[in-house]
Image: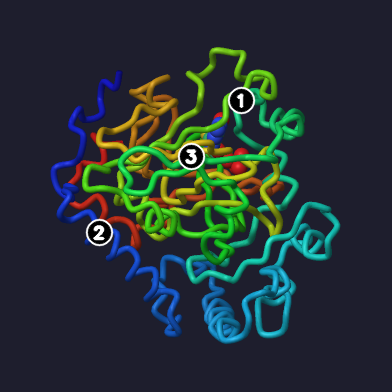
Amino acid sequence: MPTRTSDRAEPRSGEITPKNLYERVRAALRERDALCASDRSAVPDATLASDGRRSRRRKFVGAAAGAALAPLAAASWAGRTGAGAVAQDDVHPDARAVASGQAGAAKLDAKPSPFSTMERQTPYDDVTGYNNFYEFGTDKADPQRYASAMRVQPWTVSIEGEVAKPRRFDVDELRRLAPLEERVYRLRCVEGWSMVIPWIGYSFVELMKRVEPTGNAKFVEFVTLADPKQMPGVRSRVLAWPYTEGLRIDEAAHPLTLLTFGLYGEVLPKQNGAPMRVVVPWKYGFKSAKSLVAIRFVERRPQTSWNRAAPNEYGFFANVNPQVDHPRWSQANERRIGEGGLFVRRRPTKLFNGYAEQVAGLYAGMDLRKEY
Ligand code: MTE
């Protein structure tokens, strides 16, 4: 049981009530629509590159707005490498290899998103070869080594609990539920490393709109596959299986929360959570549960695997915060995977992983040291 996290089912301020739930969801949708509307200059600065490429970002944003007028069928990587988009130099060579079809996996069409960072993307080989997916083992290379045994077709995801329209979706149907976007997000692992990954998906709130959470839905629980026949790690006791995670309903409804089906222009590799995962970029990576089989809308804060395993080390909220250290190491800075060389310095970690402008309001009035 959690020892340091609050026992209350919800925080003092920002309390969710049946009355304000839909207002919150509507506000999230309005925010999303405003950002995706033609005035792309309204994109908050926190989503822009902090490394002096702001003018390029504006150029890309302009191109994206133009592209919105054209049919959105062009693959995102084609969009990035096309005229008026990001210069070739900004695109990692591995990304170009994927764009030119060398990787062999099924392509996904996606439109560019104003939520994307323009930071240099982590090489494809690192994104798909350095993973945490304990169902396949605890070594960073285990997921790539063993995940090929996982069957991802057919695959269904059941939407349960406090929703007006519970149902089981085929994953292909879920993927078609809303237009896919490419979101280049920072991923910060609680272990002190980070990556920049071009995910493909749509805001989780799009699914919420379809299943209509009731006024009792205050949290969302994400349940993932745990099949010892396909996943050797599930035979170990390193975690309580299935791996589960959870979000408060307003966190789930935030437009940055991404239901994710692909990366680098293709369907998700198995080691990254095929066929569908959630990505929550302002939280430590363990909140971004892979290979989802059920999504439950619930009234009480759900138990989560890492919180159960070590409640004093892994809180329910797990917001990236350089001022709140892990009991066994500092969270003040991070190692960006793929940045080689002897003299590469660790980067300072940013509050909410650099997404404070968009998400800090969710935690107004909360003591982030206690509700870590
Ligand atoms: N989801 C499941 N089902 N099992 C896991 O072990 N690990 C988490 C998260 N999602 C994990 C999971 C952790 S600790 C991190 S950092 C991210 O996945 C890593 O995602 P990536 O391997 O795609 O970079």
Q: Which residue is more in the foreground, 160 or 132?
A: 160
N-terminal of the pair, mark 3 or mark 1, is 1
Q: Is residue 334 above or below residue 177?
A: above
Residue 135 — which label?
1
Helix, strand or loop at mark 3: strand
Give the residue type at disc 1. Answer: Glu
Q: Position of residue 76 (x, y in %)?
A: 66, 69
For the residues labelled 2 and 1, say whether their Cβ atoms are less than 8 Å apart.
no
Mark 2 vs mark 1: give the one in front. 2
Residue 158 — which label?
3
Q: Which residue is more in the foreground, 109 or 211?
A: 211
Q: Quadrant of the N terminus?
A: top left
- Which residue position is annotated with label 2? 24
Left or right: where does residue 221 sit relative to residue 136? left
Q: Position of residue 63 (x, y in %)?
A: 59, 83
Residue drawn at the location 59% of the way across and 13% of the way down: 236
Give the residue type at disc 3. Answer: Ser
Q: Is residue 295 above or below residue 235?
A: below
Residue drawn at the location 83% of the way across and 65% of the way down: 100
Residue 277 — which label?
none
Helix, strand or loop at mark 2: helix
Check mark 2 vs ligand 1: CB closer than 8 Å? yes or no.
no
Q: Quadrant of residue 217?
A: top left
Is residue 351 at least partly visible in the picture?
no
For the residues labelled 3 and 1, say whether their Cβ atoms are less than 8 Å apart.
no
Left or right: where does residue 93 sit relative to residue 273? right
Q: Position of residue 298 (x, y in %)?
A: 30, 37
Check mark 1 vs ligand 1: CB closer than 8 Å? yes or no.
yes
Q: Position of residue 277 (x, y in %)?
A: 55, 44
Give the residue type at disc 2. Answer: Arg
Q: Quadrant of residue 329?
A: top left
Q: Quadrant of the C terminus?
A: top left
